[in-house]
Image (cartoon, rainbow, N blue to C red):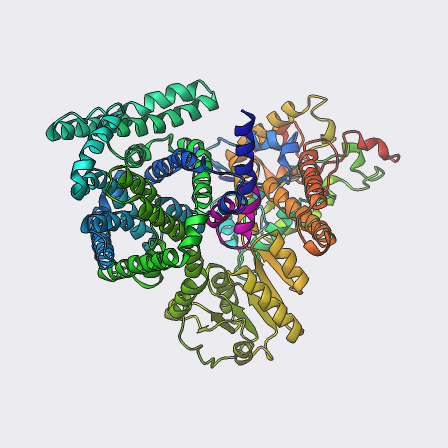
Amino acid sequence: MASHQQRVLILFAHPSQHRSEVNLPMLKASQGYEQVTVVDLYREYPTLRINIEKEQQRLLEHDVVVFMFPLYWYSTPAILKEWQDLVLEYGFAYGRDGVALKDKIFLCVLTAGGAEKAYQNGGYNHFTIRELLQPLEQTANLTGMHYLPPFALFSARTAAEENRIEQHVGHWQRLLQALIDNRVDVNKTRGLNTLAEPLESILKD
Amino acid sequence: MTAYFIQAFIYLCAAVLLVPLAKRLGLGSVLGYLIAGVIIGPLTGLVGQETATIQHFAEFGVVMMLFLVGLELQPQTLWSMRHQLLGLGGLQVTLTAAVVTGVALTFGLQWTVALAVGLIFSLSSTAIVLQTFNEKGLSKTEGGKSAFSVLLFQDIAVIPMLAFIPLLALPELQEAASKLSAAAEHHEELSIVTHLPAWATGLVIIGIISALVAAGHFLSRPLFRYVADSGLREVFTATALMLVIGIAALMGLIGLSPALGTFLAGVVLANSEFRHELEADIEPFKGLLLGLFFITVGAGINVEILSNSLITIVGLTLGLMLTKALVLFGLAILFRVHHSDRWLFTLSLAQAGEFGFVLLSYTVAEHVIPHDLAQMLSMVVALSMFLTPALFILFEKVIQPRYQKSNDDREPDTIDQQAPVIIAGIGRFGQIVNRLLVANNIPTVVLDHSAAQVDVMRSLNIKSFYGDASRPDLLHTAGIHEASLMIVAIDDRARALELVEHVKQNHPHIKVLVRSFDRAHKYELRDAGADLIVSETYHSALNMGTQALEALGFHPFHAEQMRQNFAEMENSNCLKLYESWRGEGESRSFGDHYRDLFIKLEGLMRDSMKKDRADRHTRSERGWTPPPKDYLKDFKAD
């Protein structure tokens, strides 16, 4: 089994962590796994000057790439966009010789302020979360990665008061373990809006 | 009691009024005190006979000063000075004494009197010289160190002189013998070694010095700790005073110079962790006593004697100082003290010293020198001390600048290169600017007025030219007409300002970027029309502040935001403060309004940092703050 274990790279982006209520516990819960590398992008690059070589090397060394972030204006915090713009170079991530990311798994783990029902046709956000993240999905497609629907916590601003964080973190840890063990069946996630529980429904048979 | 208060007030008043004035006029504090003394003494007669008594008391300031000097001097340093101390100091005392004795003999004095005069005048003024060195920051120079060695030797030499001078009373042996024994008896109550044979005296002295060193080494720490733990500051001060006074008394008991004893104690304590505390405690006492001492020297000038034989006294003083200076100059050559240090050494020690007064009254008591002559000679001592600050000013204003120039006195280089950027000053600051520009293939012309610096830069393949960038013709040859940018990075604030003014007036098309020293400089440069002013320490300090936040556990990105926030506030505050500074009128100073504004703005700065913790939107975190907890209620369509 150990030989099949997947190495997971978590790129964490939260610009004001002293206020974080959900993402920071998520970050902490992701640490301590031998197979998981957690990168706090804002810590490493406080001036947003990203070391491209280093980031590409990190990508090469992992099988699963996770963006972990609070949703800002239906997208990632700025540093993750900067990271994409700089790191996913032609010839590395796409283009004729750009196959470095091929067959890796890509996943967004995010928190959103709005309620889940707002993220749908007819809700005030009009689109589902998966639809809103389509630029990332297409980026994954173009770079040859397998895109998993986002793992999201909605109504995140009141999650602490409603004691939903612990449960969410627990779900994430089970999903993370499944990713490490390479038990997530990408085919079973097709068409899903998010990677909600039960986890078993997306695991390999 | 009231009389004492009035007197103390007169002394203090004279010092308070005149010393700052003298300092402002560039005369130094010592001359200020001396003038204050002259004004309250001989000129207005506000103080009179008691000055001599006060002077004896105030001489204790010299003792304290040597204690402080000792504290600054670790035993190893003192040991490494031993050749200079014995060689330079020994030769200075011997040669000066010999020459002065010779001159005195030609004046027809008896040889014993001549020799006594020679010994007395061989000494210099530790008080004036060390005080002035401190004030002008000359202590660490080669000349300053050599002068210190000589002064230290002189302080040691006073002791054998005191023993030797009574023997010179030979011609009047009959009469003097009775006086001598009377004097010896007079000393008896103050000394424990008078009746001991010489070898026993030696043993006692060695024993007590060793005990002192041992006690300083082993007992001082527990004592200081015991006192420090009590947390009573004034008791620590009392301990420091007790130490100095106690040692001075002990030295008196065994017939050694108190100054020397406390100096030794200082050296022993130089490695102590309480050193700075001791320094801080003794310093004000020393300063006041020394000031008092200088005032009494000024006040002690006897107008009657001076006016009766003005020409003789002035002539003798000038002759004495010239003689001493010649000997010192010769020694400086012999001991390879170079350049301006040679002059510093020569000029600083050319006076007679406060020990002169002591020895003169001693010689009178021992009937070695007639009373009239002694009085005149003590005027010579006082006058020579009075002239010393003038010699320091001469050194500072005339000799030192010349040597600095002569160091860089080669002709300005011919500039064979013209560039869009001229950099004036290629020290630590200019170098970095230059490297960044050159790395971007921007040709620069670098000017510096230090020949050595230019040579170093050239050896590193940086195109540098020697010359004073504030000279218009040099700027012209450097291509200022073609240049688009000038960077002023010279580390002389006045010249930097001049340069900016000149360039902005004559070549307004050039952008001028300047390094500033502090706020005042920054404002002046802004007034002069500088386009961009960067404080030399601001960015590195801000950087370190950010690192400090990170070291304290701030998230690096948060620390970075706080840094930028601070810089932004600082920028806008700076503008407000500049306007306030301008508004202070002609004086262009940091007045009350400026200070109030500064305090207010610092408060705002603090607020803006603090707010960030609260759950609300703030300046620094705009765009990074999550929406309010209940923001979903705003969306009706939900």
Q: Is residue B24 shown in magenta?
A: yes
Give the residues drawn in magenta, as a range: B15-37
Q: Residue at x 34, y 57 (%)?
A: B316
Q: In the image shown, does B149 or B127 lie closer to the viewer?
A: B127
**Quadrant showing the C terminus of chain B:** top right
Instruction: Choose between A84 and B362: the one closer to the eye.
Output: B362
Kindly indicate the quadrant of the structure image that contains residue B79.
Answer: top left
Which residue is painted at 35% across and 27% down in the image? B245
Q: Is residue B58 above or below residue B193?
A: below
Is B318 drawn above or below residue B254 in the view shown? Answer: below
Residue B81 visible here: yes
Q: Is residue B402 magenta?
A: no
- Residue placed at 51% from the left, 35% from the top? A180
Q: Report x, y in % for residue B559.
A: 59, 41
Q: Tell me if I can see residue A88 in this picture.
A: no
Residue A31 percent location from the top left of the image: 52, 32
Residue A86 shown left or right of residue B244 in the figure: right
Most extreme residue toward the right is B636
Residue A22 is situated, as x and y percent measured from the top left of the image, at: 65, 30
Relative side of B359 to A72, left or right: left
Pick whichever, B279 or B355, lies toward us: B355
The dominant secondary structure in magenta is helix
| Image point (58%, 68%), residue name | B499
Q: How far across and down, in percent of the image, does residue B527 sit?
A: 68, 61
Figure check: B18 above or below B512: above
Q: Considering only vertical position in the picture, is A101 above or below B165?
A: below
Quarter occupied by residue A94: bottom right
Compare residues B628 and A158 and report the one nearer the observer. Answer: B628
